[in-house]
Amino acid sequence: MSEPIPTRRLIGRLLVLVVAMFAFGFALVPLYDVMCDAFGINGKPSGNAYQGSQVVDEARQVRVQFLATNSADMGWEFHPKADELVLSPGAVGEMLFVARNPSDRPMTAQAIPSIAPSEAAAYFHKTECFCFTQQMLQPGERIEMPVRFIVDRDLPRDVHHLTLAYTLFDITARKPPVALNGG
Amino acid sequence: MSAVIEPGRVEPGHVEQAHGDHHGPAKGLMRWVLTTNHKDIGSMYLWFSFCAFLLGGSMAMVIRAELFQPGLQIVQPEFFNQMTTMHGLIMVFGAVMPAFVGLANWMIPLMIGAPDMALPRMNNFSFWLLPAAFGLLVSTLFMEGGGPNFGWTFYAPLSTTYAPESVTFFIFAIHLMGISSIMGAINVIATILNLRAPGMTLMKMPLFVWTWLITAFLLIAVMPVLAGVVTMMLMDIHFGTSFFSAAGGGDPVLFQHVFWFFGHPEVYIMILPAFGAVSSIIPAFSRKPLFGYTSMVYATAAIAFLSFIVWAHHMFVVGIPLVGELFFMYATMLIAVPTGVKVFNWVSTMWQGSLSFETPMLFAVAFVILFTIGGFSGLMLAIAPADFQYHDTYFVVAHFHYVLVPGAIFGIFASAYYWLPKWTGHMYDETLGKLHFWLSFVGMNMAFFPMHFVGLAGMPRRIPDYNLQFADFNMISSIGAFTFGATQIFFLFIVIKCIRGGKPAPAKPWDGAEGLEWTIPSPAPYHTFQVPPDMNPVHEHRKGPGDEVLP
């Protein structure tokens, strides 16, 4: 039988393990985002603008549908100008989303995108998106917000149909809107 | 005076050394507040656990009373949600886990020939954190807005954005009981690794000690993750972070991943010590050594390892990719292999044994049979495509109650009856014990077996009302639950009767029992093994080929 580790040192090591596992719990947060980003899983599209361009694959067409939803307690009018767009992989598509703040106070909103089916998320590149920034609207103000995107040529052959869904969150408390003349 | 007991050294004793080496416990209330004696602390853990068991059980009675008939009769949905949540939290963290820590406190030093736990003062602190934690938790029920109502799994955003105001108290209660569990686990590891009697190698330890060693490592690995996840909730609620809020770039699904990374090993934390206890009890009443001791140790370690890589089987319907579903499905099914090894070994231990069915054995045999049923429904739930139908139905409720009630709870009952003569010095009333078993057995099966049927037919869990076609099965379930619940008051009576008197128990009341705990008198003296027993093989000097090595 090998000599046991002295009790104090053993406890020290176990406490290190406890602290390490506490840190590991928090490390799961960036790890989760990295995994979602790397594998395009969970319907999370990349949060960064796509810089490249692609040769258009004229041979096939993909139908992209648009959804706009308000989260709970969000009172804005929010909808796409059209329900869907049919385009070829590699081509640049554009859709305008309309938002209006019907309340009597300035508000800030953040749109969060999601792609279905989730395995297609890695193949949906946004070159420009209103979801990259926040929207600050004065009372009654209405804007049209563009999203430009390319569906990757490597999109799996069995995917003919994509849904881009935005949920609009009220983040006024988190990011107070600046006054009318300030922004 | 050192707060740490070093191996091979007699406990330095308290300040009142003048009373002599064999002084008894202090008198009065302060004995229990200040005690560092493993037997006192073990008893307090067990009593605390039993109180939590009755409290959590009475909440289950509210749930079953409401579900006795369709429609809303007794409580409002808001209160019903608080009952399901608190029932789960109290049973998991207040009843099952402290009961096993209590058994560990009482039995591990006796089983390995140690004078006490390695860290007696920390032991006292880890116990006394629990009443504080649960006082905090239970007090939320009386606060404005009510207590936690988001299910014991407290998924965000239910537990963050939509939580009642009292959620902060819930978070601190979880922190406190987490600290308590971690300290308890460190204590168990230090005791087992450093205070074993000379000659007791790791592979000579009783399986209860082995399973607790592995459980303690599981606790140290996952309780900090639980502390982390509630800390993230706290920051989301009060400090404007967005760990679980999509609006700020977070993700509610992340909560489920972190929670179940804790949650799945947690279910093994609640069952492994029961495996260990049953592995002592079945050989004792079969009058045969345990079949496959070594494979039992490795199977336990394998289950503990696998428990870390199966967490997403709780999340098959959140939208994880196909390859993830397949991985978690197969990894989950793999757990059936080491578990099967254990069940095989228990059955093989009984095979051709000289069986007798005293109360501990009845509970142990029921444990093996009913836990296996719970294991089978677990395999059904592991099938990812089928889980889409079972998810969040009463089938899941039936499954985890079959592994927790006849698994963890029957394991605790079996242990209690098995060691009560050692603890109290009296035999419990065998007739009453058997009656307790049969009422529990019938009540428990009546309560939970019909839940399989209503679950497969689509009755959702955590809802205070249901469709009319589920009415009959729910009424049967409720009657079974009331029977089971009332029977546990009867258990309290049996234990008190045993403490107050009864046939004096000999040092070894079970003729087939093995282990150091039976070498000391009953009731166990306040201080035991102050000189460690020598477990080295005797007559070392003339050991030759053919000489049997004594245990």
Image (cartoon, helix red, strand yellow):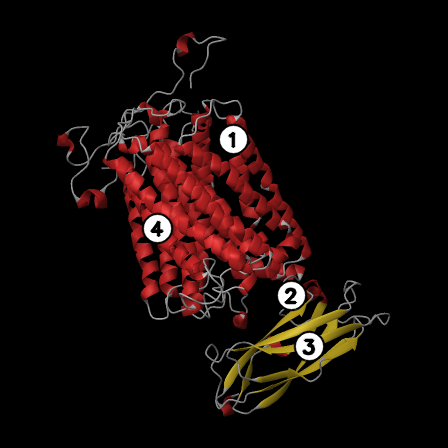
Q: Residue at x 30, y 39 (%)?
A: B495
B417 vs B150, left or right, is left
Q: Disc 3 vs disc 4: Cβ atoms closer than 8 Å?
A: no
Residue identified by numbered label 4:
B54
**Residue count near mark 3 (Cα–Cα under 10 Å), binned few <14, some 14–19, many ≥20:** some
Determine the chain carrying the residue at label 2.
A
Kind of residue indicated by mark 3: Phe
The CA span between labels 2 and 3 is 14 Å
Name the quarter where the C terminus of chain B is drawn.
top left
Foreground pick, B386 / A23? B386
Q: Which residue is mark 2?
A: A43
Position of A51 compared to B2: left or right?
right
Q: Chain of mark 3?
A: A
Expressed as whole percent of the image width and height from the top left, the position of residue B193 reads 40, 33
Dot 2: few (<14), some (14–19), or many (≥20) neighbours within 10 Å?
Answer: many
Q: In this rendering, which labeled residue sits more in front, label 4 or label 1?
A: 4
In the rendered image, residue B4, in percent from the top left (x then y), is placed at 29, 37
